[in-house]
Structure formats: structure tokens, C-alpha cells
Amino acid sequence: MLDFDGFMGYTQRIGFLPKYMNINGVGSMTIESIHYKRPILKKGYTDRLLDIDLSNNSISIRDITPVMRRMFVGGRGYCLKLVFDGTNATTRYDSEDNVLAFAGGPFCGESGFAGTGKFIVGAISPLTNTFCDSNVGGYFFPLVKQAGFDAISITGRSDKDVIIFIDGEQGIVRIMDAPETETSLFEAESLVEQWKGDGKPSSVAFVTAGIGGENTFFGCVNSVYYDVRRKRCRAKQAGRGGLGTVMRAKGLWGIVVKYDMSKGNSNKPVDRARVREAGKKIRNIIRTVDPKSMRLSKQGTTSLLDMMNSNQLLPVRNYQYGSDEREKEVSGAIFENKVFEQKYPDGCFVGCTLSCTKGCEKYTLKTGPLAGETVAVDGPEYETAATITNLDIFDIDCMLEYAWYCDEYGMDTISTGVVMSFLFEAYERGLLTKEDTEGMELKWDSPETVLTLLHQMAKGAPGFPTEAGRGLRHMKYWVAKRIAAKNGHPAERILKDLEQFGMECKGLEFSMYITKESLAQQGGYGFALKGPQHDESWLIGIDQLNNELPTFEKKAEALRWFPLFRTWFNIVGLCKLPWIDVRHPDAAKTDDPSKNLPTIQECYLELVNATFGTQKTLEDLLNESERCYILHKLFNLRQGFGTRAHDAIPLRAMAPVFINEFKSRKKYYEKYIQDVIKIETASMSDEAMLAALQDFRIKQYEELTDKVYEAKGFDQNSIPFDETLERLGMKEQVYSDIVRSARDRVKGDSGFIKEN
Ligand code: SF4
């Protein structure tokens, strides 16, 4: 029987286990379990879905149909389809029917190529109220795939904390009591020690959330694996959109997988030698290019700190400023030489010579519940370090402490920091006082204040910290109501002012780039389907630093092409960095160097065709991505969002908001107004120049919006044309119904964005 939703319904329930199981010495109560027969992995697929309902503790295994595979490929595509089918327009993040989905992709776990440990976590988000996905690396999903599953779907809600234990060696899936530990990462090694039984520590990996996920709306999912060289557990994060909050709302402490990779039968491509050859090529490109360019293999993504700072792109004081001379105290070179342990390569999965997963091996915590303990810190990544510069702090210890605690609490470093920076600016401008903040003085350049607020938010301290934990969109409304209560002005009008510098779109906080001078990146954030996260379109370097998108047409085309190709990485289980951050030496000779077409041709298309035995072209890959991309667009529309009003970005993403920002770069802006806007400035006041600049930038964004919608096959309200759906083979009634009702809705759309 073939369901159209892409799954064949059947459960392999071969036998039951006794209720009390001493799993490898853990001694946890088994609540439910099934045996299963591990399928044979072929051409990167097992074609099995593990489906668990925590409300009734049911475990089932379903076949993934060829239709599902052809239409939605894997990874983000599978997560989207699972969540779309399992939910409806009224589902919220904590609803029982919300689906928390995990999926790799056909190349996830391919050890012969670089960047193959990636998988996707997706669900309806507490921040955006629609689908959000986040990608993360590590060994978890490669092991899940070897254990027999291309995707995991979790529905329902358990009334006590549980774990799901997938034992791929014995072919058993169990739902069990969660470990009795207050921490999520601090005791990771001892948990792995218990779970591994007689096996190696590296045969165990797990995903988990933390108390920060329970007490805030931006909980992340930690992907934990054992690093055999460093002899410790490491954690990578699916950070964006509150997916750890969804996990905690389901009563799910974590999912553990056990499988010895050395017993694995690889990804079973059609032509293994050809895959290895493609892998060798990409590794050679990385080895030749990276040391002379971004140095990711030595500095991790902290190498971006210098690049962003020297180009006015590093957020400082809630994105007001883009550069600060104190950056030299936290530069990539300092991380490379003084903070990161360089003894071993740092790939987040085997085969990645880009090795950007850097870490500090010994750091003694100064604050919080574990003050005095010496821990190993993974990262910080650029994004985490930049949330700290955005709080006006240039202090490596603060970056390490913040990174470690955010991971331990299971909180997205970006959202946490951006909520804080908005509140700090509101405080600086006198919009908030100590009366509003439980007596806390929100001062810039104060590690103590930032870390205190972090600990309070994580533990859900009543009042201000708990409110802050509900995200930036909520806080804009909260601050507006507090001010309105004090001065009697209408809250809606105050909100309009706060929206100018409250850096969120669609309910998600901006990631860490100043976009005022890059129209393409403004679109990269504004049109991103899940909200302003750079993994859909990271165009700032291409547009602003390299000036490779000089016209509206080029920018619009880039805003069509890059989200599609970047989506492809997320549906197949690959990391984008070896493609986008390491340019093939021949890319410069092509018409469009930013697309890095030689690497696509020589490495990625080789990987695809050698794995599947096909003759696919780049256009074929883009078509597969576009179907998933459009499904996400339809998802947003079904949930009541996704129209033009929801692609609006804060004024600060386009231009300076306040006169102090303008004055900090007055010379540059004055010249810009003369040369680009063509206004003579001699008799203009600073305020008049600022107003002219703002007006011009808003109009530019609107003009770009028109062009991008056209390029994407959307009407001017951001709704896909019928022909777009037809071209992609998305002819089902459910999709056309969504489009029709969105068109009706938009007729009465006031453009006012409600609090989610
Ligand atoms: S480039 Fe970095 S994040 Fe990507 S797979 Fe390699 S080590 Fe992991």
C-alpha cells in the first residue's frame, strides 16, 4: 500500500523486551521497545523512517517510498514533509501533534568525501510559529543511518523525561527513563561510558537539549559525539529556531544511538572509487586554498572576526556599529595561537580536512552553577564571538564562558545575545529602567551583567529574565506595553519605533552581520524562509567585499540561485563550507566566481553521479532543491505567514536609525548621498542627510523585493504562481488550496505583524 504522504505503513514488531533493562550498566527502566532488522544501506539510503509517538510510547518503522525520495530527497526535504504532513495551521511548538524531525541525507556519513556529518532538525518553532530547521554536524546521524534509518519523527508528549535508545548493533529501539542528571553536556563522557557497554566510546553519539530549552523559546539541540583524539565528548549545535525547546516540550531528554562505525558498510555508492577520487579532489583544494585564505582549519570561523571588523560588518552595540579597535584583542590570530588546541585535526566528522571545529581544551569557569570547574569549550564559532562584540565586549574569557554555558544550558548563542543587545540598547536610550529589569543595570561592556542575565534566563528566574527568554519579538511588545503604561502613549506607536532597531524578522533574531551596506544581504535575511539566518543566503562577502553583484538583476539572480543551491546541501546531508568558503583556484576564471562552479563540477556532481549511477546536472540539483524550498514557502503560508509583509526587515538592517550611528560614519555616508543618491549635501543638516539615506534605502529594498519575487516565480505578495507549482510537479490539491487561501487573505492584509 502506497500512501501519498510518502510512507508505507507497517511496524516491525518482532518481539518485546522485559520492562526493566540494565542497558549496558545504565540500569534505566525501559518503557517500550521493539526489535528490528537492520536494512541494507544502498546508494546512501536505508529508506526507513523511525516513527515514535511519546504520548502513547508507540515505536514503529515505516518504509520511505520512492515517491518521497524522488520529490524530497532527504535531510531538510524529509523534515519539511514529515512536519508538514503531521501538523496543521493551528499546531504550535508545544502541541502534541508538532513533529520533531531529524534527517540526514544520501551523503550523510559518506566517509570518502569532506563535510558529510551534517543532518537537519526541524519542527514548528516557538519563535516563528512555522517550520524552522537547523543543520548540525557530528557523528549522530551517520550512526543513525548505519543503524538503519534515514529519518526520525517524534510526535506526542511524554509526561516524564525519557530517552530514545537506538541500538543499531542489536537491532533494538527503546523508550527509556531519562538519566538522572542536572546537566546536559558536563557529564557527557560518563553517560557515553555507560551507554557504550563493551563497545568503543566512539560507537555512541546522542542529541539532547538542556534546561535553557525548557525555560526559553530558543533552546538548541546539542549533537554530542566522542572525539577519539581528544578523548572527550564534543558538541555541535542545531542552534536556530528553538528546536531544543520543542524537544523539552515533548519530555524528550535525548536520543542515543549506538553503532560501531568500523562495522559499517559505508554509504554503498554505485562507484566507490569514483566517490573517493572526488573526495581526494576536494580535500586537495582545501589543503591548497584554505591556509592562504580563510584559515578555517586553524582559526575555525573566528577567522571571520578580522574580516568583518575591517569591513564595517562586525556587529557592535546591537548592530549600531560595524567595527571597533578592540577587535585586535579577540582576533582570529589570538584564537589560533593562544586559545585553540592545534595538536589534532578538528573535523566534525571523518574525512573533513577543513577541520573548522576548533576548541579550547582547558578553561576554568568563573560564574554560574559550575564556577571553579575546568571544562573544555567547543568553539566559540564566529557567530557566538560576535554576539559578545554586539554587547560591546571584547574579552576572550567572556566569549568562552558564554559559549560553554549556552551549550550546556542548550540555548542558541545568537538569539540569546541578540535579545540581550536589544534590551541593552533600550536601557541605554532610557526606554527601560531598573524598575523593569528586576534591578539589573543593563550596561554595555559588562561581562558580569551578560553572564548573570544568561544564568537567570536559563533557569527561568521569574519576571524580566523569563520574559526575555521568550524572544525578541515578544520583548518588543513587552517593552512597548511597559512604556505605554508609564507615559500613556499608544503601545502600537511605540512598537513602530522599537521595530526599527529590534533585529528580528519572522520572529527569529538576526545572525551576526551588519547589512546596512549590502542590499543583497538585506534580501538574504529578509527573504530567508525561516527568518534571518545566513545559511540560506550568505551574500555579504560576495556583494559587499568582492562587489560581484553590482546590479539589481545580479542581486536578484543571486537571491534566487544561492538559496536553492544552499538548500541542496541541507537536503543531501553536506556541509557548505568546503564549497562556499574555499574557492577552487579556477573559479576566478569563470563568469561567476562566487558560485565556485569548478568545485561543483569536479567534486559535487562527481559525488552525486558516482553515488547514484546517474548523469545529473547542476540544473537537476537545483530543481530538487526548489521543490523543498517551495514546500517551505507553502508551509509558511499555511501557518498564516509568508506574504510580503513578513519579508520586511528592521530599518537598522538597511540604514543607521539614530543620529549617533550616522555620525560614526558621517564622511562615508555624506559621500554616498552625493555619489549614489545624487543629492547635494552642502546645505543639509545631519538629520536631513540621515532621513534622505533612510528613505533611499527603504525604496531600494522594495525595488529589490519586486525583482526577487519575479525571479523566484512569486507574485508581488510573495505567493508562488500556479505555474511555479506545476513546473515542480507539485500538483496536489493541498498545495493549490494553500496558495488560493493566501491570495484571499492578502487582500485584507494590513501589513501589521502580530506578536507570534
Ligand atoms: S567544514 Fe567544519 S563544520 Fe563543515 S564538516 Fe568540516 S569540520 Fe564540520
Image (cartoon, rainbow, N blue to C red):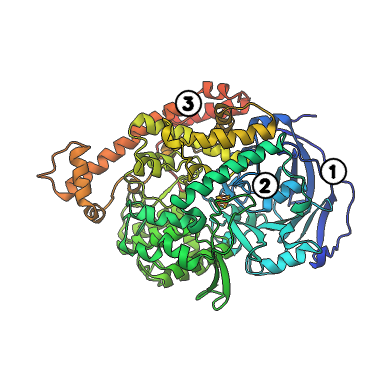
Q: Establish if 319 lies above or below 48.
A: below
**Left/right of residue 225 with respect to residue 592 in the rendered view:** right
Amino acid type of disc 3?
A: Gly
| Residue at disc 2, secondary structure | loop
Q: Establish if 534 lies above or below 63.
A: below
Residue 557 lies in quadrant? top left
Amino acid type of disc 1?
A: Gln
Whether the residue carrying mark 3 lies under 8 Å from ligand 1 is answered with no
User: Mark 2 or mark 3, which is nearer the start of the sequence?
Assistant: 2
Residue 325 % position (x, y): 31, 62
Sort mark 2 into few (<14), some (14-19) or many (20+) by Cα contacts within 10 Å.
many
Residue 196 lies in quadrant? bottom right
Q: Which residue: 45% across, 43% down?
A: 538
3D distance between C-alphas at marks 3 and 2: 38 Å
Residue 424 lies in quadrant? bottom left
Residue under label 1: 12
Per the rendering, the mark at residue 111 is: 2
